[in-house]
């Protein structure tokens, strides 16, 4: 199904007027760029897919990308200018065939590795994948990154969504971690509290400091 012209127009206007997604938060975000991945790297996919072929790992990357952008569509609506919900809906339209193929390849993987419980394991994998993108402390970096990744994904030619997944999944994963303002560095000096002595001889029967330890409350 082709993307509606009105939706394309909204993205174009946003790109011209809003500038980088970071402008929505008025901060300098951390550099989260990452090397391209294949899916075999630790921490990239939800969990290891033992014995998976390169095609199955690629399908898992595509499905993880879809899941991450789906979570962003739900979690990032507090900042509408990021367009994460509209981007996700457009992604489903633009890349429906590749997404369907990725799901089928993943389904075949779980059936191949466990004929009896393949469907159950596929469902569990899907649940874990969605959960792995949930974040609270890293919400700003995740939403900002998901917006940038989603914008690239919807304008990627059909059949090449896997390239976006390979190039940006490492970045999307790193965005889940807490990070602060990068433009300014604030130094907070160490603070050592000055505490009264706790020796019994320094306190009277009314739990008031006496002058035996050279300390008064002033």
Image (cartoon, helix red, strand yellow):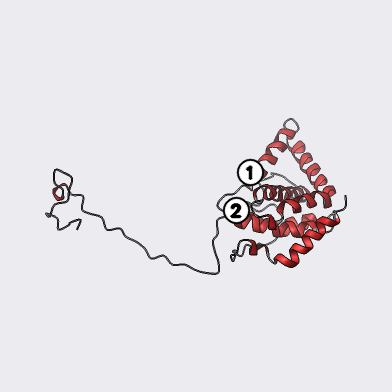
What residue is at 32 percent from the left and 60 percent from the top?
A: 192
Q: Looking at the picture, how far across and down is residue 198, in whole percent?
A: 21, 50
Where residue 195 sits, quadrant-wise, is: bottom left
Local crowd size for mark 1, using a 10 Å CA cut-off: few (<14), some (14–19), many (≥20): some
Task: For marks 2 and 1, give the one nearer the viewer.
Answer: 2
Q: Residue at x 68, y 55 (%)?
A: 80
> Is residue 178 visible in the rendered structure shown here?
yes
Q: How many marks?
A: 2
The kind of secondary structure element at disc 1 is: helix
| Residue at disc 2, secondary structure | helix
For residue 149, side relative to residue 174 (left or right): right
Q: Are marks 2 and 1 in contact (CB under 8 Å)?
A: no
Q: 218 or 141: which is nearer to us?
A: 218
Q: Residue at the spot x=65%, y=41% of the render?
A: 128
Q: Disc 1 marks which residue?
A: 131
Q: Position of residue 170 (x, y in %)?
A: 66, 57
Q: Nearer the viewer, residue 157 or 26?
A: 26
Residue 111: give x, y in percent of width and height: 77, 36
When the figure is inspected, residue 53 is found, relative to residue 193, above or below; the finding is above
């Amino acid at each position: 199904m082709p993307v509606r012209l009105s939706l394309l127009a909204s993205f174009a206007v946003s790109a011209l007027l809003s500038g980088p997604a970071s402008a929505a938060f008025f901060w300098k975000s951390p550099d989260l760029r990452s090397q391209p991945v294949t899916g075999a790297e630790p921490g990239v996919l939800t969990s290891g897919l033992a014995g998976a072929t390169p095609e199955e790992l690629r399908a898992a990357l595509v499905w993880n990308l879809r899941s991450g952008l789906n979570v962003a569509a739900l979690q990032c609506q507090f900042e509408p200018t990021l367009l994460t919900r509209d981007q996700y809906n457009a992604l489903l339209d633009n890349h429906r065939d590749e997404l369907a193929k990725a799901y089928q390849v993943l389904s075949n993987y779980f059936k191949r590795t466990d004929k009896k419980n393949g469907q159950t394991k596929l469902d569990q994998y899907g649940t874990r994948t969605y959960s792995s993108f949930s974040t609270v402390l890293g919400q700003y970096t995740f939403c900002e990154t998901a917006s940038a990744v989603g914008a690239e994904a919807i304008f990627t030619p059909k059949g090449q969504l896997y390239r976006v997944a390979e190039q940006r999944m490492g970045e999307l994963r790193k965005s889940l971690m807490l990070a602060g303002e990068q433009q300014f560095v604030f130094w907070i000096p160490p603070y050592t509290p000055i505490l009264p002595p706790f020796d019994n001889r320094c306190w009277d029967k009314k739990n008031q400091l006496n002058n035996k330890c050279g300390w008064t409350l002033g």
